Image (spheres, rainbow, N blue to C red):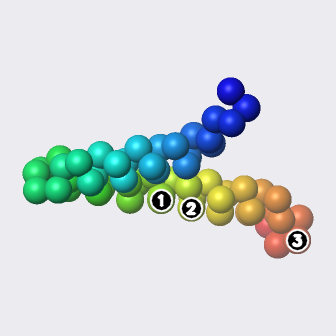
Amino acid sequence: MSDRPAMSSWGERNYLQVYREFPRTQERSHISKMLCLLKLVQVTNSTELASTKFQGLWGD
């Protein structure tokens, strides 16, 4: 399974697919919120990694 996509990209495609399959239901609102949460987690993780990586440069 070397061609298996990263979990984040797989999860994002999955949410987008479900989002398209439920265009006029309450589930769409829920999926939208979950997708936003997923992106927020990705951004937060990237920020934390950058902060840790360059901690010595920032000094604190």
Image marks 1 and 3: residues in contact by CB distance under 8 Å = no
Q: Position of residue 51 (x, y in %)?
A: 74, 63
Residue toward you, 59 or 11: 11
Is 3 left, or right, of 56 in this rendering?
left
Closer to us: mark 3 or mark 2? 2
Image marks 3 and 2: residues in contact by CB distance under 8 Å = no
In the rendering, which numbered label is found on residue 43?
2
Classify residue 36 by image quadrant: bottom left
Residue at position x 82%, y 72% in the image: 58
Residue underneath mark 1 = 40
- Determine the CA span between mark 1 and mark 3: 25 Å
Is tag 3's residue or tag 2's residue first in the polypeptide sequence? 2
In the rendering, which numbered label is found on residue 57?
3
- Determine the CA span between mark 3 and mark 2: 21 Å
Image marks 1 and 2: residues in contact by CB distance under 8 Å = yes
Is 25 left, or right, of 59 in this rendering?
left
Q: Position of residue 52 (x, y in %)?
A: 77, 57
Name the outermost residue toward the top.
1
Is 28 left, or right, of 16 in this rendering?
left
Q: Secondary structure at mark 1?
A: helix
